[in-house]
Amino acid sequence: MSKAPARVLSIQSHVAFGYVGGKAAVFPLQCLGFDVDVVNTVNFSNHTGYGRFGGSRTTAEELSEMFRALEENGLLRPSRLLTGYIAGAAALSTVAGLASRLRQHDPELIYVLDPVLGDAGKLYVAPECIPIYQSMLPLATVITPNWFEVETLTRVELTDLTSLKRALRVLHEEYGVPNVIISSMILKHWLKGALPKHIAPTPSQDDPSDYLLCLCSTSNNTDNTTDLSVVHAYAVPCLPGYFSGVGDLFSAMVLAHLQPTISPSVLQQLGADQTPLSYAASMAVTKTHAILSLTHEYAQNLPEDERLPTDDEKDKLDPERKIRRMRGRELRLVQGQNIIRSADLTDCRRMERWSDFWSS
Amino acid sequence: MSKAPARVLSIQSHVAFGYVGGKAAVFPLQCLGFDVDVVNTVNFSNHTGYGRFGGSRTTAEELSEMFRALEENGLLRPSRLLTGYIAGAAALSTVAGLASRLRQHDPELIYVLDPVLGDAGKLYVAPECIPIYQSMLPLATVITPNWFEVETLTRVELTDLTSLKRALRVLHEEYGVPNVIISSMILKHWLKGALPKHIAPTPSQDDPSDYLLCLCSTSNNTDNTTDLSVVHAYAVPCLPGYFSGVGDLFSAMVLAHLQPTISPSVLQQLGADQTPLSYAASMAVTKTHAILSLTHEYAQNLPEDERLPTDDEKDKLDPERKIRRMRGRELRLVQGQNIIRSADLTDCRRMERWSDFWSS
C-alpha cells in the first residue's frame, strides 16, 4: 500500500478526563485532516496535577508487542511521528528504537519530538531518561523543549544570550537537530534586553514579565550566510494561572503545520523572511493562544469557588481546592475546534526574524 | 460544579491503528461538540479482525481504580454514557456497577448501551457476560443490539413477525428498556413480507437481500394507543464486503442525536410521525451510511491487490491477503468529518412509521 499522505503516529499519555498528552493532540490533528494512530503510554483517569489519579502505565513489553503487531500487519506507515510524555526509561528506550527504525525506513519522516523531562527546574521523569532523549535528538525533525529541557539536554545553563547561542549550537551541531522551538521562555532581564525592538513586547502599562518568548531556530534555511541558523521569535502575552496540556497542543500544531516544501508564495502571505519552521511556529502559537484565551475566559466565568487562584499553602490544607481549579482550566478544545481548523492568516501571531541573533 | 450540558463518558475498546470502538465514536462525538471522557477497555494495535494484534486488556481492578479516582476528583459527571465492547465478565461487572451508580445519581442520564456479545450466530465474549448485560438493560435509555444480540438477550429466536414482537416485548416490558434500535436486520423472507409498502425497498433490479433493515421501537411516545411502542423502520442499501467499527459509529451517532425534549417543530422538519428516537436513528443511519459510502468508494479505488474480496479459503492460505483488505476498509472518518458535522436534513434517510406493527 502506498504511504498515506498525512498519517500521524502519536505516542504519548492518555487521560480519561480532560486534555493533556494525546487528548490535547489527537483531536486537533484529526480536525486538520490527519489520520492519527494513537499509542497510549499511560492510561490515567486525569492528569497528575489533580494530585489524585488512577490507572496504569503501559509497560515497555506492552509497547514492544504493540509496535511489533503494527509492524507485522504493515500498519506502521506514518508520514509524521509525534512523541510526548513516555513513562519510564524502559518504555522510552522502546519508543526510541521505534523512532530509529521509522527514520531509517523513511528519511522524509517528519518527527516532532517533545522531550518531556520536566519544567521550572524540576525533573519529572527518571534521570535515566535524559541520555535516552539525547540519543533520540538526531532522529528528530523538530524538537519542542521548554527552557528547563534545553538546559537539561545541552547541559548549558541559560543565563545570557551567549549561553542561549551555545545551547542552540549544541542542539544543531552536536545533536544534529535541524529545527528547535523553545515555546515559552520567561522574559528574564537579559533576554528582554537582547531582543530586537520589533520582537520586544510593545511597551505599555503591561508588565514585561507578562510575556513569554517563543523562539525558533532552523539550520535548514540559512541562505548562504555564515549564521548557524535562522532565528525567529514572538513575545506571547501570558494568561494568568496554569493550564495543562498547552505544550502538547502546541507540539501537535507544529507537527500539523510544518510543510518542509511549502511554496514561497504561501510563506509570503504570512510576511517576508518566513521559513517553514517559523510558519509552523506562527500557526501553532496563534492557535494555542486562541484556545488558551477561550479556556481562560471560560474559567473566569465559573462560580468563584471553582476559580480560586493558585496557592500552594491553601491547596495543601484543602486538596479539593486544587481539583476544582484544575477542572475549570481544562482546555476548551472541543468548543474551540473552529480555531484549530481555521486557515485564516489575517490575525496570525507572526514569528519575527531575529536577523542579528548570531552576530549580536 | 454545575453539570456540563454535553459531556459524554465513553467506555469501550481502543486501537492504535484504525477506527473501531472508541476510535470510531470519540472523534465524531467531539466534532459534534461533546466533551468526551474516554475510558479504554482494551489497548490494542488494531482490531482483531486483522488476525494478528498486540496490546493489553484493561483489568477490572484497573477500571475500578480509574473510576474511583474520577469519582473522588468529582470528574464523573457525564450527562451521557456510551458503553461498547468490554473485555471479560469481571470488567463488564465493574462497568455495570458504574452505570448503576451514574443512573442512580442522575435519572436524566442518557445511556446508550451497545450490548456487544457477538454477531451472525457467534458469541465473541464469554457466556458469563450475557446475564451481566441482561442486568444492565434496565439502566439504559437506548440499546443498540444487532439481530444476534437481540436473540441472545431475550432468548427469543427471530423467525417471524410474532417472535420479533415477542422479543421487543421482553426488552420493553421485562427489562424496562424504553428505546430499542436494531440497526441491521437481514431482510429475510418473512421480514420482507411483513414490511409495509412505504418501508419496503423500492422494487427495482436490486436484489432485496441487498438491504438491511434498521428498526427502532420507543415505548415513550405511544400517544394513548394500546400499542406497546411506536415502531419506525428504514431499509438501508447494503454496501458489499465487511467494514469494522460501523456499529460503534452508529451507536455514537444515536447518542449524539437523541434529544428527549426535542421540540415538535424540529421533529416536524424531518417529517410527520417522528419520535425523538426515530429522529436520532434517522440521523445515525444517514451519517453512518454516508461515511460507509465514502469508505467503500475509497476502497474501490485502491490497487487491486488491496481490495481482494472476502474469501476465507484464500485468506487462510495467505493471511496478508486479509490484512491488506482490512487496511483499505478502515472507516474514512477524518476525511468525512463534514458529514458527521452536518445538520442538513434535506438528504436525510428518514425512518418511517410502521403504524400497524403491533396490530398486524
Image (tube, coloured by chain):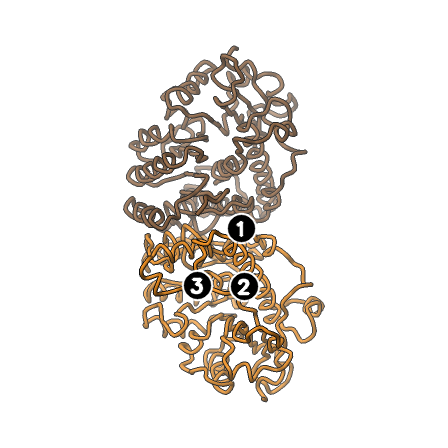
Chain colours: A orange, B brown
| Spatial separation of the CA atoms under disc 2 and disc 3 | 12 Å
Label 3 amino acid? Gly
Disc 1 to disc 3, C-alpha distance: 21 Å
Which label belongs to residue A334? 1
Closer mark to the observer between disc 1 and disc 2: 1
Name which of mark 1 and mark 3 comes first in the sequence: 3
**Closer to the eye: label 1 or 3:** 1
Q: Residues within 10 Å of mark 1 (few under 14, many from 20)?
A: many
Viewer-proximal residue, A295 or B148?
A295
- As drawn, the residue found furthest toward the top would be B359
- Is A171 placed above or below B46 here? below
Residue B132 located left or right of residue B158: left
**Are dots 1 and 3 in contact, CB under 8 Å?**
no
Q: Where does label 3 land, which residue?
A: A84
Q: Secondary structure at mark 1?
A: loop
* Sequence-wise first label, 2 or 3: 3
Q: Quadrant of the C terminus of chain A?
A: bottom right
Using a 10 Å C-alpha cutoff, classify the residue at mark 2 as few (fewer than 14 neighbours), some (14 to 19) or many (20 or more). Answer: many
> Callout 2, which amino acid?
Leu
User: From what the image shows, is residue B345 above or below residue A168?
Assistant: above
Residue type, numbered disc 1: Val
**Residue B300 in sight from this viewpoint:** no
Left or right side of A345 for A35: left
Q: Quadrant of residue A199?
A: bottom right
Question: Subunit of mark 1?
Answer: A
Residue plotted at (41% across, 50% down): A16
Query: In the image, B100: left or right of A145?
Result: left
Dot 2 corresponds to which residue? A255
> Is residue B269 or residue B356 the one in the foreground?
B269
Q: Chain of mark 2?
A: A
| Residues at discs 1 and 3 both on one chain | yes
